[in-house]
Image: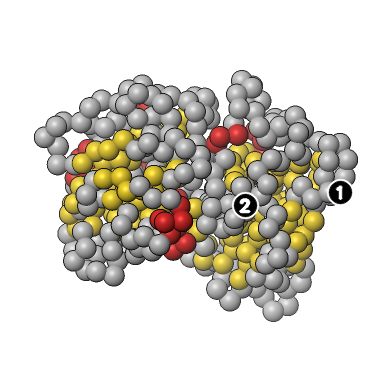
Amino acid sequence: MNNTRVLLGMAVSTALLAGCGGSDNTLGTPSENDPDSQASRKVIDAKSYDKATYLNLVTGRIVKLTEEEARSSSGWHLSFKRDAIQVNNGDVGAGSVKGAVLEPQDKFYTGSGEPRFDLLEQAANDDSEMSALTAAYPAPDHWYGGEVANLFGDKWYTYDLKTHSVVQNDSIGWLVRSAEGNSYARMRVEMLKFDPAPTATNNGFRIRFDVQPEGAEQFTNKDVAFSGSLSQLETCFDFDEGVTQGQGSGAGNTVDCETSDLWDIKLVFDVDARSLELRTNSGVSGDGNGGALGEFSWEKLREYRKATDEPVSGQSITGLYAADASGVFNVASWYAYDQTAGHVLRPNYRVYAIDTDSNDPAAPVYAVQIAGYYGDDTESGQPIVRWTEASLTEGDN
């Protein structure tokens, strides 16, 4: 899916939006690459939910680091934790790695940005998409470093290019996990209004939650509301504060973003920078154990009676929640999330440019493609990475 700081007034490419959290489902064993291929290939052990695996693209080796060590290291380029991939930049590392999209693989998406699962399942494979990895591309116009990205993206509102006004998109929603990591909620932006005209009044928002508190087996607290005016840079909400099973239907509380460690959802609105974001208390956005899953159509999400199991199969979905992350792989997801097939992550074979040091014009730039999530033994949490030196036809890195 999803996703960097959204600049109001700029067109957003829906072709780059897709994705959601990790999965425990499997696909068939991928075919082996031609041993004479120009691309390097590595299966990454990213099965841990708590510890990332760090890859150096130049050496092709895994760099063994703790998360704390990685933050001060420039010796790695990409980190992997389940399905989440980040570049060494910003809050996650001391490097100056940046990424860009070289081939968005629009052929696997509809004009509105929805995945074409028939093609992804039947027509996309390692062999057919190798040519995309090794092709020559123009130098990218835009590179991504440590910008925050998540599953909310920009689909939760509608932006009017003519009036520069914003209103809610209440046809979709998400499942979210609390900062404590032990409670959940079903969430929808019910009202959003921003009109930049000097005479405008009542610019504000309302986000509605149905909460599944710790220990509960379903949503027991309905219509918990997070609302306010669009007048602050950051506004935070703790949706499970004061919530116990079957009690506190009007619970939840707006909290101070600076002093509270237990905020669950943050609304970021900067009228001067013309940015609008939603974040969870997780990953690069916070120190909590939050996360999000979706997006879902609201019609579909209403069928969920709990945020921990899939309603038809009863399959656990707690491992699918994704933390806020950074970098190009989160701006333009490397997979499409196939709910119908049983929560399968299907690689979309997008090709990314990874500049190993954006401060050094001589540093190598690689074309990178993620060719799977289930390793060579069909077990989840094993991204298959392919990369080769990028052939850029103009400009420099």
Residue toward you, 195 or 288: 288
Q: Residues within 10 Å of mark 2 (few under 14, many from 20)?
A: many
Task: Work out how far the residue at label 1 is from the one at label 2, CA to CA, in angstroms.
Answer: 24 Å
Image location of residue 16, percent across then percent down? 42, 49
Q: Quadrant of residue 125?
A: top left
The residue most toward the bottom is 198
Q: Quadrant of residue 378?
A: top left
Residue that carries the numbered disc 1 in the rendered image:
250
Residue toward you, 315 or 120: 315
Image location of residue 104, percent across then percent down? 35, 48
Taking the spot 41% from the left edge, 38% from the top edge, the residue there is 46
Residue that carries the numbered disc 2 in the rendered image:
288
Q: Quadrant of residue 83?
A: top left
The answer to the question of whether label 1 and label 2 lie on touching residues, with beta carbons closer than 8 A, is no
Mark 1 vs 2, N-terminal side:
1
Q: Which mark is residue 231?
A: none
User: Which amino acid lies under the numbered mark 2 shown in the image of this protein?
Assistant: Gly
Taking the spot 77% from the left edge, 33% from the top edge, the residue there is 216
Taking the spot 21% from the left edge, 63% from the top edge, the residue there is 363
Q: At numbered mark 1, what does the secondary structure look like: helix, strand or loop?
A: loop
